[in-house]
Image (cartoon, rainbow, N blue to C red):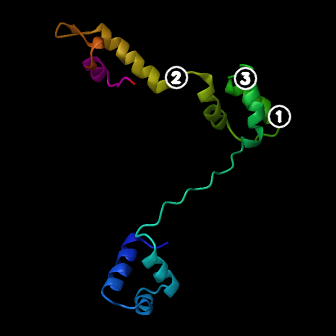
């Protein structure tokens, strides 16, 4: 993969009238590569990475059934799927279960607590929680 700077240099040489063969000799690239650069865009489109297979993937249907049944305790799930041959750790299960649990993240809980505390305080005779100043003072933004 050629850097954008090299692509610009090749295009600039071609605009100055240097032949494709000479550009290939100067840059050390094949003539077909130089021609592809001249015919294509200056910067190539970003390539998507392939999704990496996860250790939990073979057991996802089982874990989803457990979640539907109301089992959201990751330690219990880890014990159960370890018996079925799961080699991964607690973090992978927690990441998979978290969106299903309906529990807010710790960051959202801290933000809500700060907003609640800020609404109790007084600032120049006004309550902070009733205005956007309260959210700013609490360090949170409402969404």
Q: CA distance from mark 2 to mark 3?
A: 19 Å
Q: Closer to the camera: disc 2 or disc 3?
A: 3
Whether 66 is among the magenta residues is: no
Q: What residue do we see at 65% from left, 38% from top?
A: 92
Q: What quarter of the picture does the C terminus occupy?
A: top left
Magenta-tinted stretch: 133-142
Residue located farthest toward the left when viewing the structure as drawn: 124
User: Disc 1 designates what residue?
Assistant: 83
Instruction: Report the predominant secondary structure element of the magenta stretch.
Output: helix
- Closer-to-camera residue (36/87): 36
Q: What residue do we see at 41% from left, 18% from top?
A: 112
User: Disc 2 designates what residue?
Assistant: 104
Disc marking residue 128: none
Which element carries disc 3, helix, strand or loop?
helix
Q: CA distance from mark 2 to mark 1?
A: 30 Å
- Residue 24 % position (x, y): 45, 88
- Residue 48 % position (x, y): 55, 56
42 above or below 55? below
- Residue 102 % position (x, y): 58, 21
Disc marking residue 68: 3
Q: Earlier in the sequence, mark 2 or mark 3?
A: 3
13 above or below 123? below
Q: Earlier in the sequence, mark 1 or mark 3?
A: 3
Q: CA distance from mark 1 to mark 3?
A: 20 Å
Q: Are marks 1 and 3 in contact (CB under 8 Å)?
A: no
| Residue neighbourhood size for the residue with mark 2, other residues' Cα within 10 Å, grouped as few (<14), some (14–19), many (≥20) | few
| Residue neighbourhood size for the residue with mark 1, other residues' Cα within 10 Å, grouped as few (<14), some (14–19), many (≥20) | few
Res 91 quadrant in image = top right
Which element carries disc 2, helix, strand or loop?
loop
């Amino acid at each position: 993969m050629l850097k954008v700077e090299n692509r610009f240099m090749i295009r600039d040489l071609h605009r100055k009238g240097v032949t494709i063969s000479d550009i290939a000799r100067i840059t050390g690239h094949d003539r077909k590569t130089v021609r592809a650069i001249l015919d294509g865009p200056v910067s190539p489109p970003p390539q998507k990475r392939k999704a990496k297979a996860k250790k939990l993937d073979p057991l996802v249907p089982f874990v989803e059934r457990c979640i539907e049944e109301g089992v959201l305790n990751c330690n219990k799930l880890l014990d159960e799927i370890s018996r079925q041959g799961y080699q991964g750790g607690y973090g992978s299960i927690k990441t998979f279960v978290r969106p299903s649990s309906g529990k807010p993240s710790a960051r959202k809980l801290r933000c809500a607590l700060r907003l609640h505390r800020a609404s109790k305080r007084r600032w120049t005779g006004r309550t902070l929680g009733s205005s956007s100043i309260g959210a700013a003072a609490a360090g949170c933004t409402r969404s």
